[in-house]
Image: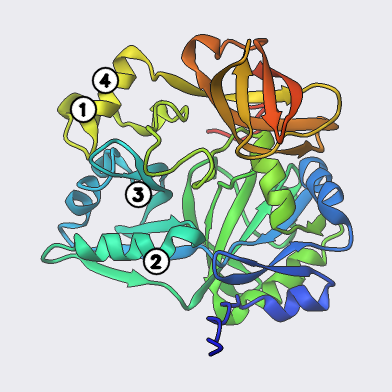
Amino acid sequence: METSKTPLHTTALHAFHVAHGARMVPFAGWDMPVQYADGIKGEHLATRDSAGLFDVSHMAQVWLSGPGAEAMLESLTPTDVGAIGEGRVRYSLFLNEAGGVLDDLMIARLDGVLQLVVNAGRADHDIAHLRAHLTDGVEMEVKSDRALLALQGPQSPAVLERLGVDLAGFHFMQIGHFTIDGVDCIITRSGYTGEDGFEISMPAAEAERLAALLFADAAVSLVGLGARDTLRLEAGLPLWGHELDETINPVAAGLRFALSKRRREAADFPGAEPILTDFTNGAPRQLVGLLPQGGRPVRDGAELALDGTIVGHVTSGGFGPSLDAPAALGFVDAVLSTPGTELMALTRGRETPVVTAALPLVPHRYVRG
């Protein structure tokens, strides 16, 4: 007997994507644009050189409020939530008791409300995780009536300024209220490309009009999920299910900065014992950049070997348009993580020489205060 497939979710910009020639693909339960006519390489380079516009409305926006919200969120993460000031944003992690990462997320404080953005592929899990830990006096709202656009690249500030947005004093990892063409928006100076840029939250009903307005600027190109992935790979930014999962310790993934000092000293977060052991002694395996030699990319899951012994594996791999060469991320034994170490990637019986490299592979260009 045939069973019907669960229909894909669509964002408020679905018709906009189709009208602009996007190739749509299923992703994390959503029908999303993987690329437009310019192709992944063209969209990637346009973001690095000018400005790229991404629909990231498939990510969940969750707001927590009430007198117990900080303590509740601290019980699930290694973040000093109380130290997140008004108008500030922090990168954080949901952790399990074994020290693994349930998901990574952004936490911001605006108008006294903790505003979270979580990954689309883990949204159902994360919302259920939060709901299961709700305490008295904490209110949780899943903002399904809002859309989220990312405007990334060196020209993105000028694009917003041409629309009347005053960015004076507004720097990386800040959040604030802004108006774009009469629409009240919440903007963070953040993103997942390694470039300066912004994530713009708005009422879903206004998303198509604002996307068209932003795209009307000559500096802006439409960018799909394909280039979003190559940009974050070059920037050395982890993706859940690849560089992060429920078995991967954040220290191994290069995320020591996400472990707040006060929380480390108190050792009061999930998985504190194994995580702090690795924080002090170093993780047995470490995330590194990988530069395949000879022009052939290596792909996720390929094993890494030294003199015939398996010493790691590739977590993300493909072509790096900014490098004009193959690029990858992977975990290797810590003693082999020094940049310049020569290894062999094994894929279906084929060997590809790779050299370890420091992360990020392409320097970040965030505008810090």
- Give the vertical position of 95 relative to 184 (above or below): above
The CA distance from mark 2 to mark 1 is 28 Å
Task: Looking at the picture, tell me which residue is in the foreground, 201 or 45.
Answer: 45
The residue positioned 40% from the left and 18% from the top of the image is 284
Helix, strand or loop at disc 2?
helix
Tag 4–tag 2 contact (CB < 8 Å): no
Tag 3–tag 4 contact (CB < 8 Å): no
The CA distance from mark 2 to mark 3 is 27 Å
Relative to residue 177, is residue 300 drawn left or right? right
Answer with mark 3 or mark 1, whichever residue precedes in sequence.
3
Q: What residue does disc 3 label?
A: 86
Q: Judge the density around disc 3: few (<14), some (14-19), many (≥20) Cα neighbours within 10 Å.
A: some
Answer with mark 3 or mark 4, whichever residue precedes in sequence.
3
Looking at the picture, how far across and down is residue 161, in whole percent?
70, 54
Helix, strand or loop at disc 1?
helix
Tag 4–tag 1 contact (CB < 8 Å): yes
Three-letter code for the amino acid on which mark 4 is drawn: Thr
Q: Judge the density around disc 2: few (<14), some (14-19), many (≥20) Cα neighbours within 10 Å.
A: few
Three-letter code for the amino acid on which mark 1 is drawn: Glu
Three-letter code for the amino acid on which mark 2 is drawn: Asp
- Give the vertical position of 122 relative to 145 (above or below): above
Three-letter code for the amino acid on which mark 3 is drawn: Glu
Residue 56 in which image quadrant: bottom right
Q: Nearer the viewer, mark 3 or mark 1?
A: 1
Q: What residue does disc 4 label?
A: 277
Q: Which mark is residue 273?
A: 1
The residue positioned 75% from the left and 24% from the top of the image is 351
Q: What residue does disc 2 label?
A: 124
Helix, strand or loop at disc 4?
helix
The CA distance from mark 4 to mark 1 is 6 Å
Task: Looking at the picture, tell me which residue is in the foreground, 330 or 124.
Answer: 330
